[in-house]
Amino acid sequence: MKKILSILSALLFGNLLAAQISTGLQLHYSFEADADDATLVRNAAGSGYNGILVGGAALKKLKDFNVVALGSSNGYVDMGVETGNLIASLEDFSIATNLYIEAGSSITGNGNFVWAFSTGSACTQTDGKYVAYRVNAQRYAQSTGGWGSERVGIEKGAAATKGVWQHIAYVQSGSVGTLFLNGEALATGAASLCPKDIGQATLYNWIGRPHFSSDAYLQGAWLNDFRIYNRALTPSEAAQLAANTDALNAAYAEQ
């Protein structure tokens, strides 16, 4: 009974705290299904930056939580060209989400990007500017032109844990970038570039799809509460956004 009460308390308190962290919030995919368009992923933070579901991706209910399930058929969320204008404006910024990767999924190969914002749909070693985060190394990177020119690379260097809900966040303040896992700093490093330095809007803005043609899509993954801020979250705010992982794990196990 105590564990149930603890989970309910975390759910209610965590949702309240998350709702309060609204300053600087530009894009917020709550993944609530739209009554009129089953493929629409609406930006709950305001107008613009809406996404669409592609392939086998689908919006679902997980008890009281709204989630997107990317599925096993190269499903992804297309955040749209307009979102590229947002990316091109970011200096200090934060990107955060709850993430679950099914235990049977393979995430050790090339690709497996949670998010990718890119000037090219099929980058190469020398072409395509991007910012992206992949779970096979838990690595955030920004490139000035292809994977051979990644000028920012902050990572744990090991694949993410599967079979459990976790909260991931990348926060950049000035020339310092920090990866947070479940509200705790996982890795910190030098960030000589910010997304604004790309110098143009990114045309290809995806959740779950790689920006390299031969790389793997992020299959068997579920996401909840995807956010982009135009400021650096504080460590305490990153921890607050991670408050729902216990309740998400309990809801997933039950359902």
Image: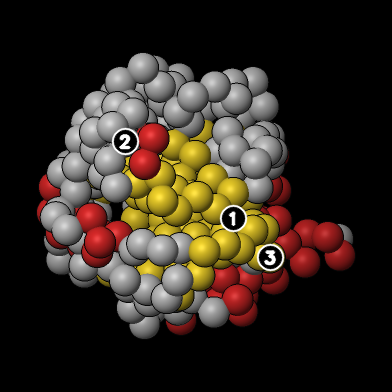
Tag 2 and tag 3, C-beta contact below 8 Å = no
Q: Position of residue 71 (x, y in %)?
A: 44, 25
One can see residue 164 in this view: yes
Task: Identify residue type, mark 1.
Answer: His
Asked whether, in this view, residue 157 is left or right of residue 214, the answer is: right
Label disc, if present, on residue 184 of the rendered structure:
3
The image shows residue 125, relative to residue 192, as above or below, that is above
Total tally of numbered discs in the picture: 3
Q: Position of residue 55 (x, y in %)?
A: 29, 24
Task: Identify residue type, mark 3.
Answer: Glu
- Looking at the rendered image, the disc whose residue lies closer to the viewer, 2 or 1, is 2
Question: Hey, which quadrant is residue 130 in on the image?
Answer: top left
Label disc, if present, on residue 4 of the rendered structure:
none
Q: In the rendered image, which residue does mark 1 sit on?
A: 167
Question: Hey, which quadrant is residue 77 in on the image?
Answer: top left
Q: Quadrant of the N terminus?
A: bottom right
Q: Residue at x 48, y 55 (%)?
A: 97
Reading the chain from its start, which is encountered first: label 3 or label 1? 1
Cα distance between the residues tagged 2 and 3: 30 Å
Q: Position of residue 166 (x, y in %)?
A: 63, 50
Tag 2 and tag 1, C-beta contact below 8 Å = no
Q: Nearer the viewer, residue 142 or 103?
A: 142
Q: In the rendered image, which residue does mark 2 sit on?
A: 146
Q: Residue at x 24, y 64 (%)?
A: 196
Asked whether, in this view, residue 75 is left or right of residue 96, the answer is: left
- Looking at the rendered image, the disc whose residue lies closer to the viewer, 2 or 3, is 2
Q: Residue at x 67, y 27 (%)?
A: 103
The image shows residue 149, relative to residue 9, as above or below, that is above
